[in-house]
Amino acid sequence: MAVLRIVRYGEDVLRQSTKEVGKISSKIKKLATDMIETMYANNGVGLAAPQVGENYRLFVIDVSEENETPNPLVFVNPKIVKKSAPINSYEGCLSFPGAYTNVRRYANVVVKAKDLKGKPFVLEAEDGSLLAKAIQHETDHLEGILFVDHARNRFETNNELAKHELPSIEDDKLLNEDEMETIIQVVEAKASEAEKQKKLEEEVAKAASTEGQE
Ligand code: NI
């Protein structure tokens, strides 16, 4: 196994499309194991082949916690077949060292792929879990799409990129996600309203208990 060099934002290979993996050859197996090692060496939760300069439809993910047994998942020729419920996701990418920003994702996804033995599997990830977000992030890499293309606020994202000496958003790559954005904002407004209501109720309860003590 070997730790590979990770391509940085700005390098062309991140924008290129990838080809389907045919036979899962020893070369592909080695690439996948090297990608897992590279992901661990960089404390990442996912890594796609284009990020190590290989234009294959292949990525690896491990969302296990530090105190858990490592659980690397290999996705060969993945395809997202279902997605629902837009949400905000605060994320980064190993090709954007140090930069994090708010992007649009779906809370629930169903992905079909093959494992390294060539066995097909279907995986469902829900509730905006790290796994659900990582599957979308990594699948995007295979289409030459980067997380900043889903940025909710281009000014905020560009500030963050500049702070980490990375190139700005490529405006022609920004995705039109107006409908997703509308839904996310409605959900966020409801959550903030519920939060306010809870605080108010807590204050009323506190005031009542203080009164009782006097
Ligand atoms: Ni990434």
Image (tube, rainbow, N blue to C red):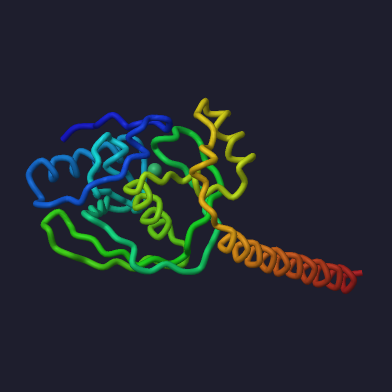
Task: Please report the residue visible at 52 percent of the width from the left and 64 percent of the height from the top.
Answer: 86
97 in relation to 107, above or below: above
Q: Is residue 34 left or right of residue 102?
A: left
Coordinates of residue 59 in the picture (x, y in percent): 27, 48
Front position in the image: 72 or 67: 72
Q: Is residue 179 left or right of residue 22?
A: right
Q: Quadrant of the C terminus?
A: bottom right
172 in relation to 166, above or below: below
Give residue 162's quadrant in the image: top right
Front position in the image: 24 or 47: 24
Task: Please report the residue visible at 23 percent of the width from the left and 55 percent of the height from the top.
Answer: 77
50 in relation to 189, above or below: above
Q: Quadrant of the N terminus?
A: top left
Coordinates of residue 206 in the picture (x, y in percent): 81, 68
189 in relation to 208, above or below: above
Q: Among all residues in the image, which is located at the extreme front? A: 172
How many numbered marks are there?
0
Give residue 87's quadrant in the image: bottom right
Coordinates of residue 42 in the picture (x, y in percent): 34, 35
Q: Is residue 62 left or right of residue 173?
A: left
